[in-house]
Amino acid sequence: MVLLRSLAAAGVRLLHHGDFDWGGITIGNLLHRRLPIEPWAFDRDAYLRAVAAHPHAARLTGSSTEASWDSRLSAAMSGAGMRVEEELVADELLEGLLGLSAGGTR
């Protein structure tokens, strides 16, 4: 947190992506409470694309948690019932990083 706060104070744009499971949402809520951070490919639409691309992903387990940055994400996750870990969408995330480094806004 100290490093992330220092980066933010220096003007670095902080982006966050996590696992689409309840633990990932909990971590995201913590980060969004404590830091000036933006979700990156970590919203309802990104989740639905990931579920469509990975129909055999593991089942979502545990108690639901509301995502503070996207009021529709948790409902979509509960409805689809799929857990999508970052490893499953690594290729898409890497493509997004290439777009960001080239000046894109993904």
Image: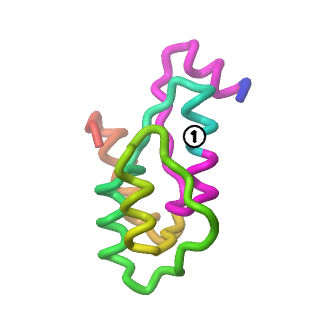
Decide if residue 91 is on the left or right side of residue 31. left
Is 32 drawn above or below residue 50 in the view shown? above
Asked if residue 76 is positioned above or below residue 15 in the image, the reply reads below
* Depth order, front residue of 41/45: 45
Secondary structure at badge 1 equals helix
Q: Residue furthest left?
A: 104
| Residue depicted at 40% across the width and 58% down the height | 75
- The residue sitting at 43% across, 86% down in the picture is 56
Quadrant position of the N terminus in the picture? top right
Q: Please provide the residue range marked out in magenta.
A: 3-27
Give residue 72's position: percent from left, percent from top: 35, 50
Where 62 falls versus 74 (above or below)? below
Q: Position of residue 55 (x, y in %)?
A: 37, 83
The C terminus sits in image quarter: top left
59 horizontally vs 55: left or right:
right
User: Where does label 1 land, which residue?
Assistant: 29
How packed is label 1: few (under 14 Cα within 10 Å), some, or many (20 or more)? some
Decide whether residue 29 is among the magenta residues.
no
Q: Nearer the viewer, residue 14 or 76?
A: 76
How far from the left and from the top, in percent, is residue 36? Answer: 51, 24
Give the residue furthest to the right: 2
Amino acid type, mark 1: Asn
Q: Residue at x 37, y 50 (%)?
A: 43
**Image spot of residue 48 (x, y percent):** 32, 65
Going by the image, does 93 lie left or right of 23? left
Q: How many marks?
A: 1
Query: Quick one: 70 or 17, which is closer to the camera?
Result: 70
In-front residue for pair 75/93: 75
Residue at 61% over, 63% down: 63
